[in-house]
Amino acid sequence: MSQKDSESQYHQFLKKQSYINRRELLQRVMVAAVFLPPQFQRGRGRRGLRAPRVIDPAQIPEYRYRILPVDRFPSLQKEFDSARSNDALGRNRVYRDQIAPLGFKIPSDFPGAKSIVVIAAYAKNMHADFHLDGESYRIVIPFQYYEEDLNSEKLKAIVRKEIIKNDSGRIVDVSDTVPLKLLAARSGLGQYARNSLIFVDGMGSYNLLYAFLTDHPCAEDHWTELRILDECNRCHACERTCPTRCISRWSYAVNIDKCLTLYNENAGEFPNWILGSMHHALMGCLKCKAPCPVNEGIAELSGELEDVTEEETLKILKGAPDEILLKSLQQKLKRFRGVQEREQFPIMSRNLQALIRI
């Protein structure tokens, strides 16, 4: 057998294996937890020597949406229950506790709900300079952790005026109670990728998902077969970039037990297998987004937040917040999760210590 024939058979084998694993994923990896990631070093798929793609921010859609009738809830719940009971999602108790309350149920105080609108709003990462000992530390704040201008209240108004076009109907934000990624994938709003993130046309994985129940009987039913990005069949950029190796080369299921985001979002000491060099954001993990070819040009876009003074940085590192500090940081960091409530502050303090390496 020639080398060419041998390579051809090998690629056919890999393609078959990829298909099998994709089918397995569609049955089990419908997790609803919000996973976050990007990064600033390059390393995209097979780009070769071509010039990098440049994206005009004005061409990125502000939001996209899809609609499903609540009659789809039983099917969605069955899929979510199947995924939640699968050990392939990991056994971490904190993570399991976080997704346990989620589900597709009509609220008892909203029996008249008829449709659910799922929205993906474009968002970009921010940077803030933290000052300490005469030095400036430029730190990234992922879009999942600060309050975007296009927030829940504004999107609720958009649902009313531009989507259902009903001034009298009831609309309820259920973003915190439904498995958003599965909802987005089943509605056709987005597609899963190897790193378990949802990619939306025109904004890649730089999107925030929201869901709104309404008693308006929408005619649309965007129910869609679950799909995986075609690019994932021939690209392993995210898997190669993941610092903890929680992304698999041979399947599309992320090992939650090893995901840096899980430990970066929750209190307590970091496991000893998480090295100092792995930390790169004030919250979450940013490693698997930027290398993705689908995110090319979008990943490079970012914004600026106000500087954090040396006095404020010292207070953060010492874990000693006062009302003046919290109020200032809420304004400067656009209501960053770590300064919204005092019990979240120790997480921010610990993460900043890891970034500044004190």
Image (tube, grey):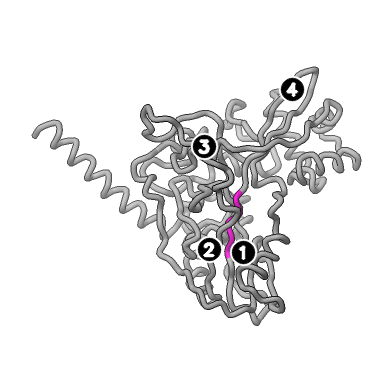
Quick one: 46 or 281, which is closer to the camera? Answer: 46
Real-space Cα separation, disc 2 to disc 1, in angstroms: 9 Å
241 versus 56 height, above or below: above
Mark 2 is surrounded, within 10 Å at the Cα level, by few (under 14), some (14 to 19) or many (20 or more) other residues, namely: many
As drawn, the label of residue 211 is 1
**Closer to the N terminus: mark 2 or mark 3?**
2
Quick one: 185 or 244, which is closer to the camera? Answer: 185
Q: Which residue is mark 2?
A: 183
Residue kind at label 4, given as amino acid type: Ser
Real-space Cα separation, disc 3 to disc 4, in angstroms: 24 Å
As drawn, the label of residue 136 is 4
**Closer to the N terminus: mark 2 or mark 1?**
2
Mark 3 is surrounded, within 10 Å at the Cα level, by few (under 14), some (14 to 19) or many (20 or more) other residues, namely: many
Q: Which residue is mark 3?
A: 290
**Closer to the N terminus: mark 3 or mark 4?**
4
Residue kind at label 3, given as amino acid type: Ala
Mark 4 is surrounded, within 10 Å at the Cα level, by few (under 14), some (14 to 19) or many (20 or more) other residues, namely: some
Is mark 2 in CB contact (under 8 Å) with mark 1?
A: yes
**Closer to the N terminus: mark 1 or mark 4?**
4
Q: Position of residue 104 (x, y in %)?
A: 57, 69
Q: Is residue 51 left or right of residue 172?
A: left
| Magenta segment includes 121 | yes
- Which is the main secondary structure of the residues drawn in magenta? strand
Give the quadrant of the N terminus: top left
Q: Which residues are magenta?
A: 118-122
Residue kind at label 2, given as amino acid type: Leu
Give the quadrant of the C terminus: top right
Name the residue at the left extreme.
Answer: 1
Could you tell me which secondary element the residue under label 3 belongs to?
loop
Real-space Cα separation, disc 2 to disc 4, in angstroms: 42 Å
